[in-house]
């Protein structure tokens, strides 16, 4: 049944994306609607064992797209827009969270921290939505002279970390009533450790590749993905001890590979594009399937 569920997601998801595109909507809309339609509360076409690992499948899809993003990002471009990317990583999210907090507090009668918690959820930027479009703009050389797509990609990656830290603080307050301001230290620690780990993995990847010069590009992609999965696993293992962004590590590793081997990065990016074609469908259909519409009906 697991394999059948996988086939249903890929076939119907691809069909939904195609139909949405034909009528002028983004492909993601069709995939999300398919996911909502086949979830347990609707048609219930997916096996429970498949839904149980959907979070892991979505994480794999994110690793693939951030790997592709890093392979298309140049260190010099990121350095050029460093200040702008840094501001983009927290300024828009901060104003969004403030606005959501004010309106939710007064209109929905939520407590201050409950309203802020809702704001952090709504203000979060999904790399899976932003990165593919920015990568296509880079490939089309659209806005690359001003480094606009590069700036947005770098900013969106750090934006997620910033919002997640605030989400953790608000959730802790709502659950326990205590403010853990020390959690704010997780922000620079998560970014710094993630970038450092990514650089180490990038150095290791290039070391292995240079030792095995005849290694096929397919195997090199497998190695890059394995290191990406390892980075995400290390984030989970180290969570009780220290904060670290596994997704930022994946992106930093890919950027280091591009910095040292630009031609190789271009070939690996093409392979990542092929993988993303299937991963995109899995990601957004499963996001749709995770929407619990029975609660929406109750609220309505």
Image (spheres, grey):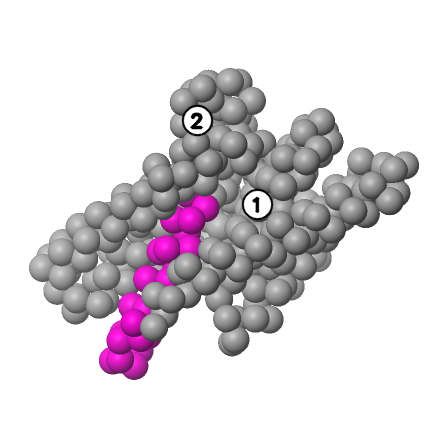
Image-quadrant location for residue 81? top left
SS at mark 2? loop
* Callout 1 crowding tier (Cα within 10 Å): few <14, some 14–19, many ≥20: many
Judge left or right: residue 213 versus residue 16: right
Residue 135 image offset from top left, x and y in percent: 53, 30
For the residue pair 290 and 171, the one nearer the viewer reads as: 171
Residue 109 lies in the magenta stretch: no
Q: Please, what is the dominant secondary structure of the magenta stretch? A: helix
Image disc number at residue 20: none
For the residue pair 190 and 46, the one nearer the viewer reads as: 190
Residue at image position (52%, 24%) is 138
Judge left or right: residue 259 versus residue 243: right
Residue at image position (41%, 27%) is 148
The residue tagged 2 is 147
Residue 200 image offset from top left, x and y in percent: 66, 53
State the separation of the CA atoms marked 2 and 1: 17 Å
Residue at image position (40%, 60%) is 187
Quarter that holds the C terminus: bottom left
Circles 2 and 1, Cβ within 8 Å, touching? The answer is no
The residue tagged 1 is 251
Quarter that holds the N terminus: bottom right
Residue 18 image offset from top left, x and y in percent: 54, 28
Residue bounds of the magenta highlight: 156-181
Residue 91 image offset from top left, x and y in percent: 27, 46
Q: Residue furthest left?
A: 106
């Amino acid at each position: 049944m697991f394999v059948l569920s996988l086939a249903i997601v890929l076939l119907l998801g691809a069909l939904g994306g195609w139909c949405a595109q034909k009528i002028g909507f983004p492909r993601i809309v069709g995939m999300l609607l398919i996911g909502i339609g086949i979830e347990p509360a609707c048609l219930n076409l997916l096996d429970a064992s498949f839904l149980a690992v959907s979070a892991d499948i979505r994480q794999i899809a994110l690793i693939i797209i951030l790997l592709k993003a890093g392979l298309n990002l140049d260190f010099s471009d990121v350095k050029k827009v460093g200040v702008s990317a840094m501001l983009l990583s927290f300024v828009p999210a901060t104003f969004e969270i403030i606005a959501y907090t004010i309106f939710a507090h007064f209109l929905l009668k939520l407590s201050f921290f409950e309203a802020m918690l809702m704001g952090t959820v709504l203000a979060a930027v999904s790399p899976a939505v932003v990165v593919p479009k920015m990568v296509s703009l880079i490939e089309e050389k659209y806005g690359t002279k001003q480094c606009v797509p590069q700036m947005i990609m770098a900013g969106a990656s750090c934006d997620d970390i910033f919002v997640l830290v605030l989400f953790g603080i608000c959730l802790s307050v709502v659950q326990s009533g205590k403010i853990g301001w020390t959690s704010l230290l997780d922000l620079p620690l998560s970014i710094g450790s993630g970038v450092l780990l990514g650089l180490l993995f990038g150095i290791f990847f290039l070391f292995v590749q240079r030792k095995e010069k005849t290694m096929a590009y397919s195997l090199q992609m497998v190695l890059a993905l394995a290191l990406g999965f390892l980075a995400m696993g290390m984030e989970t293992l180290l969570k009780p001890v220290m904060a670290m962004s596994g997704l930022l590590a994946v992106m930093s590793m890919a950027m280091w590979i591009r910095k040292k081997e630009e031609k190789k990065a271009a070939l690996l990016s093409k392979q990542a594009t092929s993988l993303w074609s299937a991963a995109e469908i899995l990601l957004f259909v499963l996001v749709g399937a995770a929407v619990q519409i029975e609660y929406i009906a109750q609220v309505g």
